Image: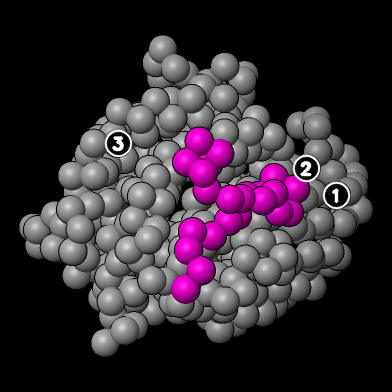
């Protein structure tokens, strides 16, 4: 095995500088033009061929042999006002890399720099993807439809994790991230004066009952966990009038697509039962979101073994399933692979305006990318 650890650590200053450039200039999904230009300049400097795809996506391949391993980084930021006060804080008001995609880009570029240097040695190939709009409506789907998986044998991706100490790797075979479904509900009744509720049908009360019933569906632990969140509720504008219409919206999260389908049906039935009992009408719009991240056992074992070799077993942690969502699951529906975490040091959580990772973690991300490519290639030739 090459000394990926030393090579990644040697590139750490470059990766930190890149990460800070990305961090200072965040862009929302499908608008990552400045981000793309920065990535393309680095790829040009490394003499790595690349092409635009799906508007603001970038892809390319190092090498021409088999097997072909895909490595992915997401590139979009969040509509969050940064509060870190860092000298390289976001210069775009109300937009922040609060989910660590700046780390993901810098780590992948570091890995590509290392792998390009060893291109003549490696007999396989590496497909890289800088993917837009992970935080929005699923840039992964569009990238797949555009052909980034053509000829690919396995897919690997990483995500920073502020619940893990810096210098650690978290892995999870099987179901890791939740499958999701969003819902928007409009409850229509008959408005009336608050002093005479018997002359109307109370849409706000009905909606509140529905919200409570849905919230009570949250239960379980681990891979049996299911979570229903109501994120917004709007009805009426004065205190003494019962509104004729009330709307609410939320999301269902669960660890399998089969269970998601069941919960979507159950949620709709609860809403309709309450609507019928309270003589209101409910317009329900449900949409299947990300399919969840379900890691392949063999590829996750490869991630674990690679991490233990690089960092030692004491720095490798098998994690529990989480209820967050990630569109990397779309890649895993098409190819075997694994999505894993690298620790950024315990601190403010993802999507926090105070998110501030330990940048030394970039070396861990880069070395893991490169070492996994080598380990997978060797495994396939045995």
Image: 112 above or below 210: above
Density class for disc 3 (Cα within 10 Å; few <14, some 14-19, many ≥20) is: some
Rate crowding at label 1 as few (under 14), some (14 to 19) or many (20 or more) other CA atoms within 10 Å: many
Out of 309 and 175, give the one closest to the viewer. 309
Distance from disc 3 to disc 2, alpha carbons, whole Å, reads 55 Å
Q: Badge 2 is on which residue?
A: 235
Residue 57 magenta: yes
Q: In the rendered image, which residue does mark 1 sit on?
A: 245
Type of colouring: one colour
Q: Quadrant of the C terminus?
A: bottom left
The residue under the point 67% across, 51% down is 51
Please tell me whether residue 252 belongs to the stretch shown in magenta. no
Q: Earlier in the sequence, mark 2 or mark 1?
A: 2
Q: Nearer the viewer, residue 374 or 196?
A: 374
Q: Is residue 51 left or right of residue 372?
A: right
Query: Is label 1 in a helix, a strand or a loop?
Result: strand
Question: Where are the magenta residues, as a range?
Answer: 43-65
> Is there a contact, CB below 8 Å, between mark 2 and mark 1?
yes
* Tag nearer the camera, 3 or 2: 3
* The N terminus: image quadrant: bottom left
Sooner in the amino-acid sequence: mark 1 or mark 3: 3
Classify mark 3: helix, strand or loop: loop
Which residue, given by chain and number where applicable, does mark 3 sit on? 11
Q: Position of residue 350 (x, y in %)?
A: 42, 41
Query: Of 84 and 59, which appears nearest the observer?
Result: 59
Q: CA distance from mark 1 to mark 3?
A: 58 Å
């Amino acid at each position: 095995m090459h000394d990926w650890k030393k090579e990644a650590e040697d590139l750490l200053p470059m990766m930190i500088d890149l990460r800070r450039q990305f961090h200072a200039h965040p862009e929302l999904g499908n608008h990552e033009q400045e981000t793309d230009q920065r990535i393309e300049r680095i790829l040009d400097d490394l003499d790595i061929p690349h092409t635009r795809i799906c508007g603001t996506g970038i892809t390319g391949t190092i090498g021409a042999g088999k097997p072909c391993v895909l490595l992915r980084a997401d590139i979009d930021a969040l509509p969050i006002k940064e509060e870190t006060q860092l000298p390289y804080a976001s210069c775009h008001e109300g937009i922040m890399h609060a989910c660590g995609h700046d780390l993901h880009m810098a780590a992948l570029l570091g890995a590509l720099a290392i792998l390009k240097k060893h291109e003549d040695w490696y007999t396989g190939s590496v497909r890289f993807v800088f993917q837009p709009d992970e935080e929005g409506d699923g840039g992964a789907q569009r990238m797949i439809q555009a052909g980034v998986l053509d000829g690919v044998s396995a897919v690997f991706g990483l995500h920073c994790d502020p619940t893990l100490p810096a210098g650690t790797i978290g892995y999870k075979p099987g179901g890791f991230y939740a499958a999701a479904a969003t819902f928007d509900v409009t409850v229509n009744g008959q408005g009336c004066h608050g002093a005479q509720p018997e002359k109307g049908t109370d849409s706000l009360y009905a909606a509140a009952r529905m919200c409570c019933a849905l919230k009570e569906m949250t239960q379980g632990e681990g891979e049996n966990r299911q979570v229903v969140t109501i994120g917004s509720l709007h009805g009426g504008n004065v205190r003494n009038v019962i509104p004729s219409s009330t709307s609410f919206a939320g999301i269902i999260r669960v660890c399998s697509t089969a269970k998601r389908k069941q919960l979507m049906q159950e949620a709709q039935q609860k809403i309709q039962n309450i609507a019928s009992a309270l003589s209101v009408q409910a317009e329900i719009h449900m949409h299947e979101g990300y399919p969840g991240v379900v890691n392949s056992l063999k590829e996750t074992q490869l991630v674990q073994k690679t991490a233990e070799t690089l960092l030692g077993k004491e720095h490798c942690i098998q994690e529990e399933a989480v209820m967050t969502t990630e569109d990397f699951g779309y890649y895993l529906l098409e190819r075997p692979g694994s999505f894993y975490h690298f620790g950024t040091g315990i601190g403010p959580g993802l999507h926090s305006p105070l998110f501030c990772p330990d940048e030394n973690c970039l070396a861990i991300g880069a070395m893991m990318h490169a070492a996994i490519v080598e380990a997978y290639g060797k495994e396939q030739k045995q």
